[in-house]
Amino acid sequence: MKSVNQLQWLIFKGKTSFIMLDIGNNSGKSEHLSSNFMVDRKSFEKSIKRKKTFTDFFLIFCGVFSAGFGLKGFLLPSNFIDGGSMGLSLLVNEVTNINLSLLIVIINAPFILLGNKIIGKDFALKTTFAIGALAIWVAFFPYPHITNDKLLIAVFGGFFLGTGVGLAMRGGAVLDGTEVLAISISKNSSMSIGDVIMFINILIFSLAAWLISIETALYAMLTYLAASKTVDFLIEGIEEYTSVTIISINEEKIRDMIVHKLGRGITVYKGERGFGKTGEKLYDLKIINTIITRLEISKIKHEIELIDPEAFVFMTSVKDMKGGMIKKRRLKD
């Protein structure tokens, strides 16, 4: 068989693996191939980086457009407010008549500086672009006034504003700097990020009730709920996934059922089972983990019950997921 020096760079669905076959003594060719490989790898990485940057800024731009529509098409014509730094900007604008675009920049500027310190330069640059673009968009881009119905204004104003915030987050930026403040405070206190955000919004809604009216504050809460739920859907996904962990002496049958009957991928861990008390012997076992949709929870519980009624099963919510067998694969007859 002829000696071969070969370098292959395999690319599959955006994932790279590197294989070097060095058979024989042709070191000169091997070094030349390695040099070409490094050049190709750098070119590939630059291409991926450019693609990601374009995608991020496209998402941010779409987020700015949606947030602007929520503000000028719904909230601003009816003097509604929201939570977070945007709600604070709207509240100050309502009370003082200071230009909203200017307020958006001024109120979020400290959060951008804080984000640069605790998250990174890339985040700060993208957030600066996002907030600056939103300020310009609100100042100069005309939107139609959609409705005078207060309930529709609160719900759909919050929806489009939340869509904008969620898309910006997908692009690696924020349109609401209070998220950054919440991260910073939670690191130096016993409060969680959710606790900090809730406290900030309670303060904003209380100020709205005192300075404007209780009705305005109540509608602001509804707007915020619509916006926050929309953000959750965009960041975590509308289809909720559940991680299922199964410990059973019949792990082979359960594994076969999940793969062939449900069409899902699995991960198998090695573990030990036992109560751990003195005199009791621990024994080895295999632990099965799989990811399913919430619509499949009842089915997998039923199938496990048929195989092993004594199986130990626990489930946890999955916030985000990438790769693997996320969607059900087609099974052959």
Image: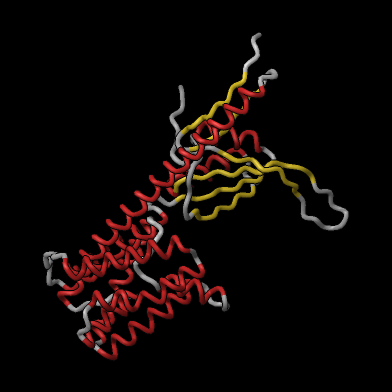
Vertical placement of residue 275 versus 37, above or below: below
Residue 47 on image: x %, y %: 42, 41
Observer able to see residue 136: yes
Residue 320 on image: x %, y %: 47, 52
Taking the view exactly as shown, the residue that stands out farthest to the right is 279
Q: Which is nearer the eye, 173 or 312? A: 173
Q: Quadrant of the N terminus?
A: top right
Quarter of image, res 110? bottom left
Observer able to see residue 221: no
The residue sitting at 48% across, 76% down in the picture is: 195
The residue sitting at 23% across, 67% down in the picture is: 136
Vertical placement of residue 330 versus 297, above or below: above
The residue sitting at 11% across, 65% down in the picture is: 144
The residue sitting at 44% across, 49% down in the picture is: 294
Residue 289 on image: x %, y %: 59, 44
Quarter of image, res 277? bottom right
Vertical placement of residue 189 versus 292, above or below: below
Taking the view exactly as shown, the residue that stands out farthest to the top is 1
Q: How is this picture coloured?
A: secondary structure
User: Left or right of 216: which side holds 126?
Assistant: right
Taking the view exactly as shown, the residue that stands out farthest to the front is 28
How many numbered marks does the figure carry? 0
Q: Which is nearer the eye, 107 or 159? A: 107
Q: Which is nearer the eye, 59 or 244? A: 59
Residue 157 on image: x %, y %: 23, 67
